DNA sequence: TCATCACGTGAACCTGGTTCATAATGGTGC
DNA sequence: GCACCATTATGAACCAGGTTCACGTGATGA
């Protein structure tokens, strides 16, 4: 009697339908105009049915973010397993991150919104921890790269712990993207090549950590070639 | 006939009352529960009066952010005028930023929320540009420090423009704080001393840029002493 | 075939932001 | 002083949109 199981499958499929449709609506009309009733209608279901899956609108948004975050983390894990030096892999994480948010323009904005106190605190504990759980394996994987580097003497941790060490590149990348994202904050700065800035400063930070082999950031051609190679070998 | 002017003064005073009370309410009960009607009532005015000042709730939030940003920028400008080397001043900006957001815990969260597409796009153009305008002088001041450093040969811009150069330290600082802020994102990382991480990575980035004089980040005592001196001389 | 039950439904509900007809205030000219 | 008018304050009504729940429907199983 697989009727119970079929039910669960159908339920899961419907949740996917809701999420995919929500994503489409957001892409087409913006986060601003997403409405629960309209989403349900767009999927040919009643509003109440939508609420059997998501306790609130905030829950839906967190679920949406979690779904993409899963892909994001998978990409990161793939990068950490790349057969290359630790320095190259650390930099590849930045390239991958930039690539991912370029491929999914609404994702970064959604994340930014979801981590807002107003949304995060309103979502259910369950959905929040579902999102947090996605991060565990990727943090472990990146920590692994850092530890490898330390063990190989390719970087001196100094007074920093493994986690603190990985926080630096993460912060550069996240901070840069967040600044770029904020309309009105950086328009006036008129940065021509925001992507290049991310790459250069990531390399600068790794250089600053003394992470071998040191990269010559004044060599723009080499930087471009490296980014291209990473995108071709890892991301395409 | 100063009756017109008096009106304007009173109007401005009332706006301040609204903003200050909103700030208090947010501090006491959270951004989540701020309600326009309750705010008006708390100031002994009717709801409609509040709407003579702010076109919408989002407008109020942007105004609130702008008010604090003004102080924030003033602090930054003070730092850029500090009689010290360019390297020390760049680092002092990080210390000042961290200090400011520690002193105003709700400010960072408010900013994060305000720069969200949902809020930013809903606020009036006027309020948005009022906020953006606050940044202009501070960007100019920091650019000045960068240019001074370049002129003095204390840093090689390489392929980076002045603005791109200043973006790096900004991103480290902003990114680090943003990551720390996000509950659930970094709890699991169990970083003991988040502040120290910010300082170390700022210095690491400046070292990576070859910004003279290079700082020995493994010397924790020197770092602590420097931070303390900056806080004492500039911020207290 | 019928009783039961789980699930879908969408109109009604409720919260809270926004508006606007009305009242109050205070300045101006006689 | 007083009458008039312009300006501003008021808060009840309005409205949008998230959430709920009493009801209907179709499947399940005896």
Image (cartoon, coloured by chain):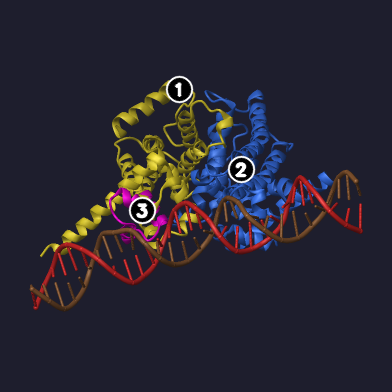
Chain colours: A yellow, B blue, C brown, D red
Magenta-drawn segment: A39-65
Q: Is residue A113 magenta?
A: no
Q: Position of residue B120 (x, y in %)?
A: 54, 43
Q: Residues within 10 Å of mark 3 (few under 14, many from 20)?
A: many
**Going 46% across and 28% down the picture, which residue do you hit?**
A196
Whether residue A135 appears in this view of the structure is no
The answer to which of marks 3 and 1 sits earlier in the sequence is 3
Q: Which residue is mark 3?
A: A63
Q: Position of residue B8 (x, y in %)?
A: 78, 46
Structural distance between the alpha carbons of marks 3 and 2:
35 Å
Q: Residue at x 40, y 50 (%)?
A: A35
B227 above or below B184?
above
Badge 3 element? helix
| Residue position for label 2 | B94
Residue B80 located left or right of residue A231 = right
Magenta segment's dominant SS is helix
Q: What is the chain letter for disc 3? A: A
Mark 2 and mark 3 in contact (Cβ < 8 Å)? no
Q: According to the image, label 1 marks what residue?
A: A220
> Dot 2, crowdedness within 10 Å: few (<14), some or many (≥20)?
many
């Amino acid at each position: 009697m697989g009727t119970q199981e079929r039910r669960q499958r159908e339920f899961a499929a419907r949740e996917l339908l809701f999420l995919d449709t929500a994503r489409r609506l957001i892409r087409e009309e913006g986060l601003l105009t997403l409405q629960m009733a309209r989403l349900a209608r767009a999927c040919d279901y009643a509003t109440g049915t939508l609420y059997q899956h998501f306790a609130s609108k905030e829950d839906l948004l967190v679920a949406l973010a979690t779904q993409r975050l899963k892909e994001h983390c998978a990409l990161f894990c793939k990068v950490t397993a790349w057969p290359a030096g630790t320095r190259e892999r650390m930099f590849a994480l930045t390239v991958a991150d930039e690539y991912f948010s370029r491929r999914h323009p609404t994702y970064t904005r959604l994340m930014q919104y979801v981590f807002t106190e107003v949304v995060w605190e309103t979502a259910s504990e369950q959905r929040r921890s579902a999102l947090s759980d996605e991060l565990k394996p990727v943090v472990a994987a990146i920590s692994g790269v850092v530890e490898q580097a330390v063990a190989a003497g390719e970087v001196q941790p100094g007074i920093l712990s493994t986690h603190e060490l990985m926080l630096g590149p993460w912060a550069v990348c996240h901070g840069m993207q967040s600044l770029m994202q904020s309309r009105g904050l950086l328009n006036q700065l008129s940065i021509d090549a925001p992507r290049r800035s991310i790459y250069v400063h990531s390399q600068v930070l790794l250089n600053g950590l003394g992470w071998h082999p040191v990269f010559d950031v004044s060599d723009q051609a080499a930087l471009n070639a490296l980014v291209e190679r990473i995108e071709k070998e890892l991301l395409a």
